Image (tube, rainbow, N blue to C red):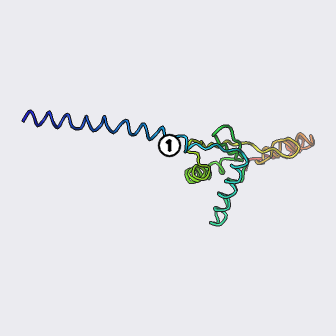
Amino acid sequence: MTEARKIVQEKPQAEVQIAEPKKEEEKVSLNPKLAEEFDEQKLNSVLQEIIGQYRDQHKNLETTVLKQPVILSGETITFQLNGEIQQDIFHKIKPEVFQLLRRKLNNYSIHLESVIVEEEAGDGKKKLYTSTDKLQYLKEKSPALVELQKRFGLETDF
């Protein structure tokens, strides 16, 4: 019985030792094939193909997110998004887009990231979204509004 235990204990160890070198050899031979280099032009053409697929599926929000400016630094692709809504949509489609990019670019070591970039108005000033921001802008433009606000007790929050 002790001989049987020795044989059972020795047999799995021998299999593990044989299997490990094969895996390492496969990794070494596959790595050069899976990291094909690409440039911004190739990335943009692949992105246009993906945008076409989303457009054909009538996924308009996803198409808008994918049309945002892209920065390529090494193997990191960064999408410049306009706000949190676009970022939420990006996080929902990220796994699918990631797989498509990896397959079409033939590069499995790329990384996808997103950054929210505040869009500025044409004259370099920040866009006015809230009523408080709009009132503040108008007060700077026309000081008479300050007097009207005080005289009539006007508030922007409602």
| Rendered location of residue 94, percent (x, y) | 58, 50
Between 57 and 87, the one lying in front of the other is 57
* Element under disc 1: helix
Between 52 and 24, the one lying in front of the other is 24
> In the rendered view, does 137 fall on the left or right side of 114?
right
Q: Residue furthest left?
A: 1
| Rendered location of residue 136, percent (x, y) | 83, 41
**Residue at image point 19% right, 34% down:** 9
* Quarter of the figure with the N terminus: top left
**Residue at image point 67% right, 64% down:** 55
> Badge 1, how many Cα within 10 Å: few under 14, some, many 20+?
few
**Residue at image point 15% right, 36% down:** 7
Between 155 and 31, the one lying in front of the other is 31
Which kind of residue does numbered mark 1 sit on?
Leu
Which residue is tagged 1?
30
Quarter of the view holding residue 113: top right
Number of callouts in the render?
A: 1
Above/below status of 28 relative to 45: above
| Rendered location of residue 144, percent (x, y) | 93, 42
**Residue at image point 93% right, 43% down:** 142
Quarter of the view holding residue 60: bottom right
| Rendered location of residue 59, percent (x, y) | 64, 62
Above/below status of 14 relative to 69: above
